[in-house]
Image (cartoon, rainbow, N blue to C red):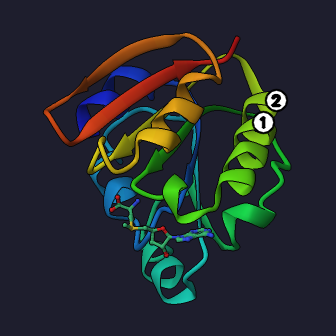
């Protein structure tokens, strides 16, 4: 994931849903991204993430189910979290997110178990052209462009 953010994150306004305690956010401070908004439903996680001392970063406690983008962004990251939502909520969130993404934007998704998350991966693939796919047998990373 770090390599993908290095590849796609420069000069981007990043939104990470299900950011947890900011472990990815902390590892990409060297990427010259413009801004980084992290959203997670767990307030203890966002409290820890908020300790990142960098003015580009902000974190919010909110369910991604209730997240409505209130600003432009170019790179969406969802690492190990989309499948926490049910099918209908996944579709609604993906539709909302891709509609709000700036032209030229991309989204990076990862799942730990591609077989188990097959329906979620199918749903992701329907959002737009896959510009990169990598990973091993189980762990998958998909980079999807906004149509
Ligand atoms: C498996 S962890 C992954 C954390 C981080 N993305 C990573 O890969 O290290 C799943 C994260 O999704 C968050 N999460 C679960 N349901 C959520 C929801 N409805 N809205 C926002 N975050 C949620 C959890 O609090 C947790 O931080």
Of residue 110 and residue 44, the one placed in the foreground of this image is: 110
Residue appearing at x 73%, y 30% in the figure: 98
Residue that sits furthest to the bottom in the current view: 44
| Secondary-structure class at tag 1 | helix
On screen, residue 109 versus residue 146, left or right, reads left
Residue appearing at x 81%, y 48% in the figure: 69
Identify the disc placed on residue 8.
Answer: none
Give above or below for 43 relative to 108: below
Residue appearing at x 68%, y 62% in the figure: 64
Q: Position of residue 32 (x, y in %)?
A: 42, 32
Where does label 1 land, which residue?
A: 95
Give above or below for 128 relative to 108: above
Give above or below for 101 relative to 91: above
Of residue 58 and residue 41, the one placed in the foreground of this image is: 41
On screen, residue 106 versus residue 70, left or right, reads left
Residue appearing at x 34%, y 21% in the figure: 7
Where does label 2 land, which residue?
A: 99
| Secondary-structure class at tag 2 | helix
What is the crowding at mark 1: few (fewer than 14 residues within 10 Å), some, or many (at least 20)?
Answer: few
Query: Image quadrant for the C terminus?
Result: top right
Q: Nearer the viewer, mark 2 or mark 1?
A: 1
Of residue 13 and residue 94, the one placed in the foreground of this image is: 94
Q: Position of residue 47 (x, y in %)?
A: 51, 84
Give above or below for 57 relative to 4: below
Q: Position of residue 40 (x, y in %)?
A: 57, 70
Q: Position of residue 70 (x, y in %)?
A: 85, 49
Discs 2, 1 touching: Cβ within 8 Å: yes
Rounded to the nearest angstrom, the CA distance separating label 2 from label 1 is 6 Å
């Amino acid at each position: 994931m770090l390599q993908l953010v290095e590849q796609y994150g420069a000069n981007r306004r990043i939104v990470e849903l299900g950011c947890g305690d900011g472990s990815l956010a902390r590892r990409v401070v060297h990427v010259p991204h413009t801004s980084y908004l992290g959203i997670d439903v767990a307030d203890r996680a966002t409290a820890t993430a908020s300790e990142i001392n960098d003015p580009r970063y902000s974190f919010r406690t909110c369910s991604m189910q209730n997240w409505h983008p209130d600003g432009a962004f170019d790179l969406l990251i969802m690492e190990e979290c989309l499948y926490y939502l049910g099918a209908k909520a996944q579709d609604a969130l993906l539709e909302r997110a891709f509609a709000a993404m700036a032209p030229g934007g991309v989204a990076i998704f990862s799942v730990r178990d591609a077989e188990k998350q097959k329906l979620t991966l199918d749903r992701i693939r329907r959002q737009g052209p896959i510009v990169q796919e990598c990973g091993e047998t189980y762990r998958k990373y998909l980079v999807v462009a906004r149509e």
